[in-house]
Amino acid sequence: MDHALHERLHLVLEQQRIAFDRERLPTLARRRDRLERLRRMTSENAEALAQAMSQDFGHRSRHESLLADLFTVESGIRHALRHLKRWTAVRRAPTALHFLPAGNRLMPQPLGVVGIVSPWNYPYYLAMAPALAALAAGNRVMIKPSELTPATSSLMARLVAEHFAPDEMTVITGDAEVGKAFTQLPFDHLFFTGSTAVGRHVALAAAQHLTPVTLELGGKSPAIVDRSADLALTAERLAFGKLLNAGQTCVAPDYVLAPQELVRPLADAIVAAMRRLYPRIAGNPDYTAIVSARHHARLRGLLDDARARGATLMPTHDEHPDDRRLVPTLLLGTTPEMAVMREEIFGPLLPIVPYGHASEAIAHVNAGDRPLALYWFGDDRAAREDVLARTLAGGVTVNDCIWHLGQEDQPFGGVGASGMGAYHGVWGFNTFSKLKPVFVQSRFAGTRLFHPPYGKTFDRLLGLLKKIS
């Protein structure tokens, strides 16, 4: 590792740690002030941030940036401000009868300095959503954004420097080597959003200091279409969920499981829905480009591999854009050995896999890694509950896609290979807090009866406790 880089990162960390030591339990007013500054920074620079994201992507839908990156952050801040007083309060906890008149309390305390490593696909939201939770909890924050979105990362660094002292929150820009060094710092908590493969390396780096980690990863999130589903409605919502950000979304439906007799009607309906949402691809301001030439080539490679192995490709448009916009394509007749069925797609390609009985769809999901998201479409309540009970996923949306991610009153996080830990709302506050249990003993505590020397009184009392506890 470059020695100068190592020293620079440790200096920033040490400055934040010293500042935290001066103010280990920030007041409610201080936390509100930090959140308000983050809200103003977001709202006043929304257009500039949307332009920077579009520059990084080669083109990104302004409306999608305003909704998915900027509104989501402001919404999370407003939610935190509404509930912060309750979250930060010392909470009374129940006390067992045999410990009375003593009492229990739960005291939320900030951890210290939080490191956040954010990805390129939603470069503002996935940096600032965990940051707002960390600030609400009273922590100092260091952010390492993706090198694949340099304009957005540079703008974030400048804006944060204008609105926050360096020992409150700072953005560290740089390449993958900087990111690697960043994850090796002895943070009090490390929050990473990205691929499962990189997440493993992050967990190993954090383990060197026993740094607790939250990993928000990805994987192949399935959509299961039940025979009771409304095909037109299902197609429209799958089309939206798949093509938001051109499929470059961690919770995008990666593939669809559909009853074998409905595969072709559903495919036709999805193609029609995608054409309605995006009448053209080339030059369409609503349709986002693939973030880099390398990722564009990777997606083209998935299509070429599937075609060579016998899949039927259904492009939605007869166009050949001359930029990195990629025509949405459905894939039928896929097989497990195809790369498109083994790798997370992260683009506007959608395989549709047939099943006979619903149990086959469940078995297909359970045969793979546990997904970050699962989608179920249908009106059969019993069938829905069966799928929910027999599958395990980070989160679920029923009869739509994506929207469970936007719920501030629900935790968001993965399970297994799709991640560990959760945030949003109070779950984010708790992630970046130590909920310290405090037992306050009474002057008249009966526990002195359990002090030695031991004898018959001890035995009788222990027997009594076994009966009443």
Image: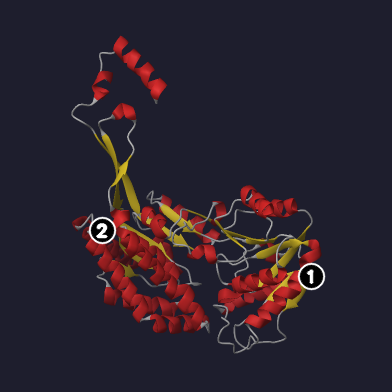
- Relative to the observer, which residue lies in front, 239 or 230? 230
Q: Position of residue 431 (x, y in %)?
A: 39, 54
Q: Do we see residue 100 in this rendering? A: yes
Q: Nearer the viewer, residue 125 or 467?
A: 467
**Element on which disc 1 rests:** helix
Can you tell which quarter of the image residue 98 is in?
top left
Q: Residue visible at 44% across and 62% down?
A: 408
- Residue 264, which numbered label? 1
Q: Earlier in the sequence, mark 1 or mark 2?
A: 2
Quadrant placement of the N terminus: bottom left
Indicate which label's residue lies in the foreground, 1 or 2: 1
Residue 23 in the image, given as x and y percentages of width and height: 20, 57
Q: CA distance from mark 1 to mark 2?
A: 59 Å
Q: Position of residue 184 (x, y in %)?
A: 39, 58
Q: How is the image coloured?
A: secondary structure
User: Which residue is under mark 2?
Assistant: 17
